[in-house]
Structures are given as C-alpha cells and as structure tokens.
Amino acid sequence: MSYFLPENDPVLTAARGLALAHTGMIEVNTSPLYLRASAPHPDRRVGLVSGGGSGHEPLHTGLLGRGGLDAVCPGEIFASPHNRQIYEASVAAAKSDGVLHIVKNYTGDVINFQIAAERLRHDGIPVATVLVDDDLSTDSTDSATGRRGTAATVVVEKLLGAAADQGATLEELADLGRRIVSRSRSIAVAARAHTSPTTVSPAFTLSPDTLDYGVGIHGERGTCTIARPAVGDLVRRMTDDLLEALPEGPGEVLALVNGLGATTELELHSLSVLWNDELTSRSVRPVHVVAGTYTSALDMAGFSLTLTRLEEGWSDLWTAPTLTPLVLPRPALTPEHSAPAPQLPTDAPARTPRTDGSRTLLDRYALTVTQVRDNLTHLDQLVGDGDFGDNLAGGVRRAVKLADESTPDGMTALADAFLNDVGGTSGPLFGLLFQHLATASPSDDQPPSLAALADATEAGLAAIHRVGGARPGDCTLVDALAPAAEALAASAQDPAAEAPLTEAAQAAIRGALATASLRPRRGRASYVGDRALGVPDPGALAVALLFMALADIHEPATAPRLPAPGYITLH
C-alpha cells in the first residue's frame, strides 16, 4: 500500500482522483480540503457531513452523493480533520434545517467536530451530532473516552442518507442516528498489521499462529492475542461477544462483514456464509448480510463483524437507491436530469478584521511561551506524542503574524490562529477559550472589566466542556481553567478584591501543578495510565501561563512570575 503514496499531499491527490473517477458527482474544495456532492436530493432539509482520518477508504467518501452524505472532510492518514475543514464544509452543505455531523468516537474527531459545531451555532446555523461508538472491545467503565467508532458508521451514514432524502428534519435525523448507534456493535480481528506509510513496515508483528482480537481501525493492538482458531470457531466467538453486547430487541438484524484492507473478497464472502449460519442457528434473522471492504485500516489483514438490530422501516432505508461512488449490494439510482450544483469557491472569503484592543497581552504571552516551549515539549513526550510545545508556540507565532498584518486585538488574533490553523486536540480547544476571552476586550492602560473577564472565562470553560467533556480531575487544561474561572467569579462579587487577576493566576498555577498527582482520564495521556503520574499536564500549564501574563500586565506588583526563563517545575 504505502509504497505508492505521492510524496506531497497524498490525501488531496486521492480526493482529486476520486472526483476524476466520478465526473459530475463530486466537487473538491482545496483550501480547506473537503469533498461535496454535486447534486444532492432536492427534498433534503438537512445537510449530512462526516469525515475522519484517511486510510479507511471507502468509508465516508464512498457514501458521498445522493442517498448518502453531502460533504466529507478527510484528515491526514489516521488523523482527524481540522475543525476549519468541518466548519466550512458544513457551511457549504447546510440546508434549510441546518446540518448533521456524523462522528466516529475518537478524541481528535470529537473535539474538532464539536469546535466546528460551536462555530456554526455562533453563526446561527442549526447543527446536531450523531456520535458512532460501536466497538465493543473498548467498552470499559474505566475509560471516560468510551467505545471507538468503527464499521457501524457505514450503516449510520446509509440509513441517515436515505432518511434525509425523504425530507427528515434535523431533530428526526439526530434521533434516528442515535437509535441506530445504540443498536449497533462491532468487533474486529487481525492476522497482520497495516503497513506504516512512514516505515514501510508492519505497525506491529504477529506470529503466523496467532491473531489479535479486538483491534482498532488505526492499527491499535487488540485487547488480547489469541492462538489462531479454525475460522468457524472464530466467527462463533465473535458472534457470542456481539450478541451478548447487543441491546435486546426484535430478532431481525443487519449483518455487515467488513474487510480491513488486505482481506480478499473470497474470504469475506465465505465469512458471510459462516456468520449467516451462526446467526440463524441462534434464532437471529439476518435480513441483510453484506460483505465487502467498507471501513479499512490501510492494508491490515483482518475483518470486523457489525450487527445492527433493526427497527421498523430501517430495512427500507438500507435498500433505498443511491448515487454514490460506493455501490452497496442493492440497485443504484439512475442519474436524473437535474441542474448542476453551484460551483464551490476554492477559498473561504476573507474576514473583516477587528481593529480594537491591544497587542500587549499577546506579546507577553508569546514571550512566555517561547521561554517554556522546550519544557512543555519534554512534558508532553512523557505523557503524549511530544508536539504540544511546538503546536502552542507555532499558534502564538501565527497570532502575532495576524496581529501584524490585520491589527485585531491580541486575543482575537489568538482565537483566529488557534481555531483555523493549529491542529491536534488541544490547539482548537485553546482557540475556543481565546474566542470567548476576546469578548472581554482588554486594553493597554486599563485592566479588562472584571465581570466581563469572569463571564468570558466561564463561557470558555463551558464551551471546552461541551466539546471535549473534560471536568476538573480529568488531568487536562480544565484543571487550571476551572479554578481560574472560580477565582474570577468570586472576585467579581467582592468589591474589596485587591488583586483579582493575581488570584486567578495563582489558582490556575495550583490547579496545573496538581495535575501531576492525577491519573489522566481524557486525551492521549489517558492511554499511558499510571505512567503519567508525577507529570503536570502541559495544557493546564499553558492556561496558567496565560493568566500569569494577564496578571503581569495589569497587576505587576503581585503577579506570579516564572522562576527562571525556560523553567517549568515538575514538583
């Protein structure tokens, strides 16, 4: 697989190739990248938008078109799309009742789709989300993240696409999607890992007589490695696990046999017969048995089984006609004579910059972040992927450039830079915080209104919680932001408060340092478990540094300062 990827922009190149293969069906927007159906059904009241990391094809893009999705946002390989892609695709796809996001339950996908949703609501565009979480191998009460979203996404997108063509409202589609998700479960196995595009080697190794049971679609190892059983015994075990996890209900099901990339049609169709026999022997009636590669993991040698317990009318939605690149095993819609959809602009219109406010806070924060970037990077290497320091510093540099070019106030420049240009999980979350803090409009010679700053901080905290679900104690930036918000709110109610910004900064520092004693429950650090103990959360420290900079500008006599340039304590 990865021997033949173009060196530059493989995802964009593949998007253009898909449009080339389906002339008149798909339009490609390049900046930011998203694909849009050229001729959606005229009865649609809601635009359907999905997306995720590339490498899972034909997932998402294969169901782009009539009877499927209105827009798809492809991220880099195994990486979530940026919130700007999702936001602008949603604006382009939105219809009279708004837009529905179909999101696989992975942290980056959830965060970026939620931030895009926040931006759409800010613009007055109705939006709802269906979160797909079907992978029973990750069903654990010990994790705040929940089950992963995998091959049931195909079922959700197909059924919702048919319902949208029938004129369903946003509320009706959201309710239908959540019911489909709640009645769907999947489990996957692999005999060989996918080929890493970077190393051109398997992501992990298995001996010929073993299988990984419960693998993920990004090459995540399974929950256990098992001796390779006879295929019939393997299907029986997977069926046992699926039926035990599937909610009770009528005996009619949709059964999806999905290849993970390197599993042949011969194998998949053979598996479908074994599975059909296994289900019928248990008085479960497979109304539809579908076999093929629908949600791949690049070229992983493996397969997944997905069961959806059907409700009345869902079978008709599954067999409803489509005009999409992926032809499901049902009759496809004959193209109709219809007016072409309007051409999409290749670039978003430029925003009118704000010109009020000051640069002082931005410049002070930029200086501080530059001093501690390497330390933040080191902390992130201990608990994550090591990119936090560079991402934070790069976002701040981008904000300074924006402020130099278009003279908005510093906080608005930070909001624009982090929402539109900083990737990963934490970058857009900081963008939401900056977006709300910008409403407090601090200036050079006067501190921000304490009440306005308290309200803005609380609003930013609420937005971050809506998007990511983090609460104090989860070992995230919220552990610094929440105490700062509480301190500001208390000072706003106390006319005698002498140094409210200093109090907020000190509260944020205490909260950030206290994360060293917490076992992470959110984000990438949650994957390392107890290994994160003793390491303060880099995002929480970055929040504390922001409030330190604010206090240093307006309350220099009392404001806390860094002990030395470039130093952040681990104690």
Image: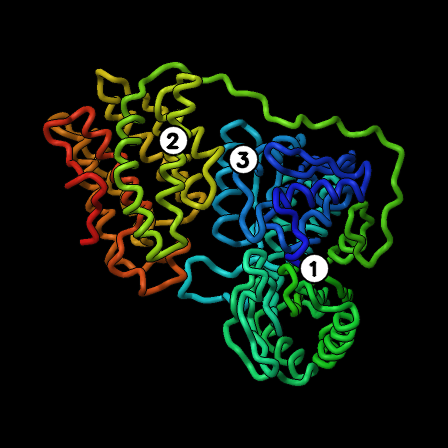
Percent x, y of residue 397: 38, 31
Q: Earlier in the sequence, mark 2 or mark 1?
A: 1
- Residue 22 image offset from top left, x and y in percent: 80, 42
- Badge 3 is on which residue? 84
Of tags 1 and 3, which is closer to the observer? 3
Please state if 506 lies on the left or on the right of 469 as rendered: left
- Quarter of the image that includes the C terminus: bottom left
Left or right position of 13 against 333 = left
Expressed as whole percent of the image width and height from the top left, the position of residue 66 reads: 78, 42
Q: How many neighbours does mark 1 have within 10 angstroms: few (below 14), some (14-19), or many (20 or more)?
A: some
* Residue at image coords 58%, 51%: 77
Q: Nearer the viewer, residue 271 or 288?
A: 271
Looking at the rendered image, the disc whose residue lies closer to the viewer, 2 or 3, is 2
* Amino acid type of the residue that numbered disc 3 sits on in the rendered structure: Arg
Q: Quickly name the residue at label 1.
A: 311
Distance between the alpha carbons at the discs numbered 2 and 1: 53 Å
- Disc 2 marks which amino acid? Arg
The residue shown at (66%, 53%) is 156
Residue 165 to residue 31: above or below: below
Instruction: Mark 2: give few (<14), some (14-19) or many (20+) Cα within 10 Å.
Output: some
Residue 569 position in % (x across, y down) = 19, 49
What residue is pinned by disc 2?
397
Q: Earlier in the sequence, mark 1 or mark 3?
A: 3
